[in-house]
Amino acid sequence: MRKIYIFDTTLRDGEQSPGVNLNVKEKVEIALQLEKLGIDRIEAGFPAASPGDLAGVNAVARAVKNATVIGLSRSREGDIDAVREALVGAADPCLHLFLATSPIHREHKLRMDKGQVLEAAEAAIKYASKYFDKIEFSLEDAGRTELDFICEVTAMAIRAGAKVVNIPDTVGFLTPYEYGNIFKTVKEQVPGVEKIQLSAHCHDDLGMATANALAAILNGADQIEGTINGIGERAGNTAIEEVAMALETRQEFYGAKTSLVLNEIYRTSRLVSKLTGMPVPGNKAIIGANAFAHESGIHQDGMLKEKTTYEIMSPETIGLKESKLVLGKHSGRHAFRENLAELGYEGMSEEQLNIAFAKFKELADKKKIVTEEDIRAIVEEKLVDTVEMYALDFIHVSYGNQSVPTATVRVHTHEGEVIEEVALGNGSVDAIYKALDRATKEEVELSDYSIKSVTQGKDALGEVHVLLKQNGVSVQGRGVSTDILEASARAYLDGVNRMIEKRKQSKGSASGEISFK
Ligand SMILES: CC(=O)SCCNC(=O)CCNC(=O)[C@H](O)C(C)(C)COP(=O)(O)OP(=O)(O)OC[C@H]1O[C@@H](n2cnc3c(N)ncnc32)[C@H](O)[C@@H]1OP(=O)(O)O
Ligand SMILES: CC(C)C(=O)C(=O)O
Ligand SMILES: [Mg+2]
């Protein structure tokens, strides 16, 4: 199978992302991880840009042993000399020269005509050839360059001594068909092209960077340039992980592969994101948090039955432990039961499962993601074998810092009686508890109250614990809700129910009846 060389420019084009600035230590850390990932060529920076970048490229050159290390340079002797200095100590150094070739760049930026561009590029390659065995030449903005001029410049670069010619779509302008056609034409028409490698370098301005790189491969490109996580100038570059996984997943279609160690992809992505400060969007292909996560019931059911129903790649391939079935409002019973089993709640009756599932759906309507702690809280509250003498239907609290808090509560009894009560209190919770006392006609003393957040985020579940006393007997009550007042009401009512049950138990034992657990 044809090998596609991977040229990583995370440390150069990636660092050109606005707001990104990697120091020497960070560049080396990323470069060493790129080496582990099996990257063939690492572009470490632009040494003429600053003394700091020269030092960064030099540190990478000295640290990396198993990949080519590259420095970028304009077609100017001063820049080339800076790369010479920066690559001292590299096991396999390479100079990357560039000059723009498109009419727009020639006229407005370089103020050169075609002849001057050819002349300047040739002079630079020839000067550099005295110092470098490996030279790559890039036709900047080739995507908007006349096709015959691309061929002319490529032929010149080959004659002058370049080993790799890169044909970038610098501004992400082309369609895959157009970009592929450039490679096809260069392959067919440029003399000596078989002696060098052709490289593709794409930008994502129209979201085409990966599609264009793959089109280049289909039309003869030997090397793909890109970055980890697709970071880079403006909308970024081709994401290396996307190309590698496309070739891996569709081998029968592309007939080409990289030599990347694929299970290092995820780790590399995390490191680059951390050190560049550029978060990876959740929906990003391959490495986004949702790339191997499934939320909807139908998909989760399919995944549980056979993973290939909804996954074309396995997460293990990129170094992730497993796919995730995220519980949310679109999830179904299959995934819920599976999740409960994973959390150790096995052997639940169908009825218990249904109660917990209903509660879960109620919570999922209020929360974006239902977490493990949420599920535990739901199940543990629901599975306690307490007969609910009173169940909460609703609470309404009126509160203002200039008015007396008023609570209205409605509960229904085990027998189906509905009771509604209103009370004033010193605070909202106090008002609720007084209203519940009236509704239940139980005289209990609140001897402790605590509240904590059991999950994370603004929509976290609050868990309230109360300790109630009656005639020297103490019981605990617990309530969970996204609303702390509701959690407070539930905890109190739970305590009251337990108190009633305890009373029944002690009477039952005294009369020889079988007691509850
Ligand atoms: C497509 C790409 O990603 S290309 C790489 C882009 N990366 C960078 O530019 C990052 C590093 N750059 C820098 O630090 C600075 O731009 C430097 C140090 C290279 C140059 O800084 P300055 O000398 O102040 O020049 P400045 O950046 O303002 O302008 C660029 C000059 O280089 C010229 N130039 C641009 N590309 C090339 C080239 N490939 N070869 C020769 N000259 C070039 C421009 O025409 C302009 O020349 P002028 O001063 O005669 O008008
Ligand atoms: C320097 C070149 C290869 C570049 O980054 C581009 O053209 O996008
Ligand atoms: Mg670029």
Image (cartoon, rainbow, N blue to C red):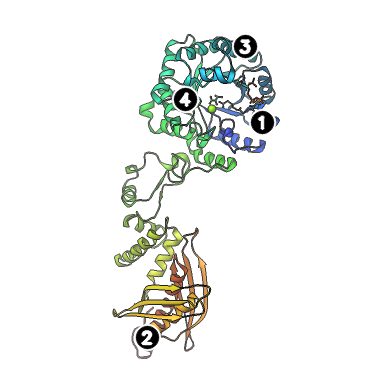
Q: Amino acid at mark 1?
A: Asp
Q: Considering the numbered disc 2 on the image, is that residue within a helix, a strand or a loop?
A: helix
Query: Is the residue under label 4 in contact with that under label 2 (CB below 8 Å)?
Result: no
Q: Residues within 10 Å of mark 3 (few under 14, many from 20)?
A: some
Q: Residues within 10 Å of mark 4 (few under 14, many from 20)?
A: many
In the rendered image, the vertical position of residue 366 relative to residue 56, given as above or below:
below
Query: Which residue is labeled 2 in the image?
Result: 504
Marks 1, 4: nearer the viewer:
1
Marks 1, 2: nearer the viewer:
1
Q: Residues within 10 Å of mark 2 (few under 14, many from 20)?
A: some
In the rendered image, the vertical position of residue 125 relative to residue 298, given as above or below:
above
Marks 4, 3: nearer the viewer:
3
Judged left or right of residue 190, residue 49 is right
Query: Which residue is labeled 1 in the image?
Result: 53
Residue 313: image x %, image y %? Answer: 39, 39
Query: Is the residue under label 2 in contact with that under label 1 (CB below 8 Å)?
Result: no
- Estimate the spatial distance between the alpha carbons at disc 2 and disc 4, rounded to whole Å: 77 Å
